[in-house]
Image (tube, helix red, strand yellow):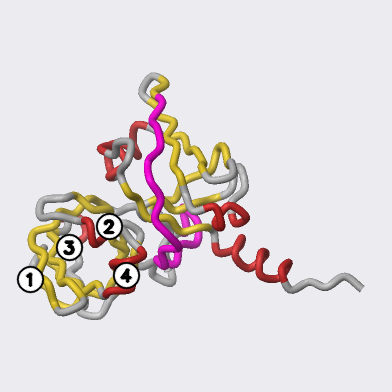
């Protein structure tokens, strides 16, 4: 599992087609490679959990299959693009964001960006069926970033972004029309499922 607290920005160095999949080679920040890495460990790339299959120093390789490419924005990446990175949470780690599984529910798009001094209020459109899993002041993962929902409407929501978030994540370069990965709060999913199966006597 992850927390939605991005550890750093990586950069796509190569993309190689592999039948129905692709192999991504990503250069990770120095801070993420300070204690090395293990083949087989999980890393969230723009909020999508992938497995390290190969590595050489700061160049880590991952595979993304057809299901991942159809449900996330990873298939739209090009060489040179920045990506949000987070290694999985260790057992003794601090949960500073919220519980993020790295299982992207759907993609959405940046709808509009409102500036308020150094802050930004960013609006996103999303598939309507995800709306029942969102509540104002609840949590949402956008491209793997743990954020607090400000406004939730039928098929769009807003978040308030502080300068730090804009500086250390890809949200600082997003523009209207950009495709982003969305993962709703796992607690909302369980509540929705339990409620759907409830039959009043």
Between 91 and 161, the one lying in front of the other is 161
Report which quarter residue 200 is drawn in: bottom right
Q: Closer to the observer: label 4 or label 1?
A: 4
Magenta-highlighted residues: 95-114
Q: Closer to the observer: label 2 or label 3?
A: 2
Q: Magenta includes 105?
A: yes
Q: Closer to the observer: label 4 or label 2?
A: 4
Lower sequence index among marks 2 and 1: 1
Circle on res. 56: 1
Q: Closer to the observer: label 3 or label 4?
A: 4
> Disc 4 vs disc 1: Cβ atoms closer than 8 Å?
no
Mark 3, Cα crowd under 10 Å, few <14 / some 14-19 / many 20+, is some
Instruction: List the residue tagged with mark 2.
Output: 85
Looking at the image, can residue 17 be seen? yes
Q: Horizontal and vertical percent for residue 188? A: 61, 60
Spatial separation of the CA atoms under disc 2 and disc 1: 17 Å
> Disc 3 vs disc 4: Cβ atoms closer than 8 Å?
no
Mark 4, Cα crowd under 10 Å, few <14 / some 14-19 / many 20+, is some
Spatial separation of the CA atoms under disc 2 and disc 3: 12 Å
In the depicted structure, whether residue 132 falls above or below residue 186: above
Residue at image point 24% right, 72% down: 64
Q: Closer to the observer: label 3 or label 1?
A: 1
Q: How many marks?
A: 4
Spatial separation of the CA atoms under disc 3 and disc 4: 25 Å
Q: Horizontal and vertical percent for residue 10? A: 18, 54
Instruction: List the residue tagged with mark 3.
Output: 33
Report which quarter residue 112 is drawn in: top left
Lower sequence index among marks 4 and 2: 4
Q: Residue furthest top?
A: 117
């Amino acid at each position: 599992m992850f927390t939605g607290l991005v550890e750093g920005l990586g950069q796509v160095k190569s993309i190689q087609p592999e039948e129905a999949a692709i192999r991504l080679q990503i250069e990770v920040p120095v801070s993420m490679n300070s204690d090395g890495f293990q083949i087989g460990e999980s890393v969230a790339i723009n909020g999508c959990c992938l497995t390290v299959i190969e590595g050489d120093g700061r160049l880590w390789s991952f595979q993304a299959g057809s299901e991942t490419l159809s449900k996330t924005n990873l298939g739209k990446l090009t060489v040179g693009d920045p990506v949000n990175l987070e290694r999985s949470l260790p057992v003794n780690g601090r949960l500073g964001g919220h519980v993020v599984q790295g299982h992207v529910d759907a993609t959405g798009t940046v709808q509009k960006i409102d500036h308020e001094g150094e802050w930004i209020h960013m609006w996103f459109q999303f598939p309507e069926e995800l709306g029942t899993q969102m509540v104002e002041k609840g949590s949402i993962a956008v491209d793997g970033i743990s954020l607090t929902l400000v406004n939730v409407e039928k098929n769009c929501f807003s978040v308030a972004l502080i300068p730090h978030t804009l500086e250390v994540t890809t949200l600082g370069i997003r523009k209207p029309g950009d495709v982003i990965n969305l993962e709703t709060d796992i607690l909302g999913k369980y509540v929705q499922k339990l409620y759907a199966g409830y039959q009043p006597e």
